[in-house]
Amino acid sequence: MFSLDQRLKNDCVLLTDLALSQLLLMNDQQYPWLILVPRVADIQEVFELSNQQQGELWKEVAMVSKLLNEEFKPEKINIGALGNIVRQLHVHVVARNKQDVAWPGPVWGAAPAKPYSEDELVEIRSRVLRNISSV
């Protein structure tokens, strides 16, 4: 049975369920940062998914990347699946700009997270959910 890793629960806000994955928002206002977590139990690596699931995951990565690109007009979209700390398979999709605190380096560990306010969470959740179906 699928269960979201506690560290992801602590660091993120659940936005919605897509065909394969839970779509999470990293609770860090320094970057538009979404995370896809396939709802498949005990998976750590992409190759552990079926071929169909792999295709669906990359379709979702492309959809979320396009959404971030259209909504936030970043310099670059970063996509990564590290898993060194949180072993559960999850894919980070981060909209990056030259003005962000970590540019041009990776976002992980660059600066302490700055959580969204409740109003900011409502606003970004609305932006993402309003546009997820149109990309």
Image: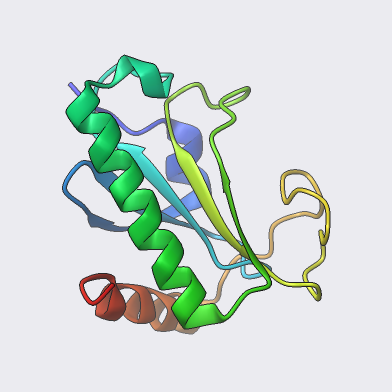
Closer to us: 19 or 28: 19
Closer to us: 9 or 92: 92
Seen in the picture, residue 78 relative to 89 is either above or below; the reply is below
Closer to us: 89 or 86: 89
Residue located 33% across and 80% down the image: 126
Residue 14 visible in the shown view: no
Name the image colouring. rainbow
Q: Position of residue 69 (x, y in %)?
A: 50, 73
Residue located 31% across and 51% down the image: 60
Closer to us: 104 or 112: 104
Q: Position of residue 6 (x, y in %)?
A: 44, 33
Seen in the picture, residue 106 relative to 65 is either above or below; the reply is above
Classify residue 80 by image quadrant: top right
Seen in the picture, residue 21 relative to 124 is either above or below; the reply is above
* Left or right, 49 with reference to 83: left
Residue 109 visible in the shown view: yes
Seen in the picture, residue 83 relative to 102 is either above or below; the reply is above
Q: Position of residue 31 (x, y in %)?
A: 64, 66
Classify residue 129 by image quadrant: bottom left
The tally of labels here is 0
Quadrant in which the N terminus is drawn:
top left
* Left or right, 59 with reference to 77: left
Quadrant in which the C terminus is drawn:
bottom left
Residue located 69% across and 57% down the image: 113
Residue located 29% across and 78% down the image: 131
Q: Position of residue 44 (x, y in %)?
A: 42, 19
